[in-house]
Amino acid sequence: MTDRPHKRRKPCSLHQKKKDLSSRFGWVSSNWSGYACTGTPHQYRRISAEWTVPCVLPSKGNSYSSAWIGIDGFKNSSLIQTGTGHDWVQGKASYYAWWEILPNAETIIPHPVSPGHHIRAVIAKLTPKTWCITLSNLTLGWTFRTIQCYLGPQASAEWIVEAPTVGSSIASMARLTPVTFNKCRLNGKSPAFRTCQKGIMIQGRRMVSIPGNPNRCKDGFTVRRDT
């Protein structure tokens, strides 16, 4: 395993929404883009989705990104999550799988991931204190599973493309091919996505990661990097 910068996914860093964005997006962040559902404590106990690992395009400097599902982290400081990472570091693309429970940093999943691979992720509550995190690479046929303790409020659920924090700062968002989330489920049902639940990422006063409208079944969407 090659050395990687110390990375951490963090709760959504919300910005005040601009008036001209009010009709198209529900929220604005400097590190998240995608869809977030919010509810009452203990409302969300299972989340899942599938996506295809995107391709990282070259950038002038180091840049980072992750695609993931998670519970909590939107308007609270807890978070349980799993997904894939796609970075451009020292002139090379890097791809990997990971899971994370705040406040701890990511744990790398020791199985291969490459662009175009079909990923399925599930996070499910087993008991009041234990959760099962499952990530599968359907292209290569491997599945990783871990049982962990998590005591967060279970008050939000997300399907996100993120610019992670590297060291102490939010990283520059990597240039990616589009990421499409599909077969999204929340508590075993379609989340019935609405436009007011989607958020864009703004870095340096530019929109850099933009989710599209929900698909016809309202259980999927595509996030595009504004290059």
Image (cartoon, rainbow, N blue to C red):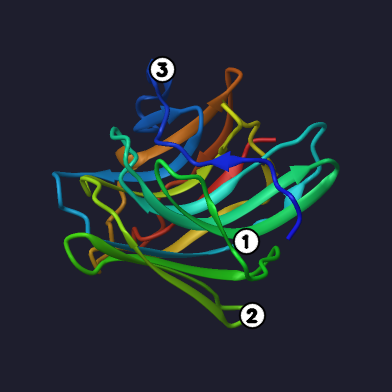
Answer few, some or many: residues within 10 Å of disc 3's Cα (few below 14, many 20 plus, some between 14 and 19): few
Percent x, y of residue 175: 70, 41
Q: Is residue 102 above or below residue 75?
A: below
Could you tell me which secondary element the residue under label 2 belongs to?
Answer: loop
- Compared across the picture, whether 155 is left or right of 61 comes to left
Q: Which residue is denoted by mark 1 in the rendering?
A: 53
- Residue 76: which quarter of the image? top left
Q: Which mark is residue 140?
A: 2
* Tag 3: amino acid: Lys
Disc 2 residue crowd, few under 14, some 14–19, many 20+, Cα 10 Å: some
Tag 3 secondary structure: loop
**Circle nearer the N terminus (3, 2):** 3
Q: Amino acid at mark 2?
A: Leu
The residue indicated by pointer 3 is 18
Task: In the rendered structure, find residue 122 and report the number of the disc placed on it.
Answer: none
Q: Quadrant of the N terminus?
A: bottom right
Per the model, the C-alpha gap separating discs 3 and 1 is: 31 Å
- Where does the image place residue 48, in percent across and percent down from the top left? 37, 64
Which callout, 3 or 2, points to the residue nearer the camera? 2
Element at label 1: loop
Looking at the rendered structure, the kind of residue marked 1 is Val
Q: CA distance from mark 3 to mark 2?
A: 43 Å
User: Do the residues under discs 3 and 1 have CB atoms within 8 angstroms?
Assistant: no
Q: Is residue 209 left or right of residue 80?
A: right
Viewer-nearest residue: 164 or 107:
107
Residue 19 is left or right of residue 206, and the answer is: left
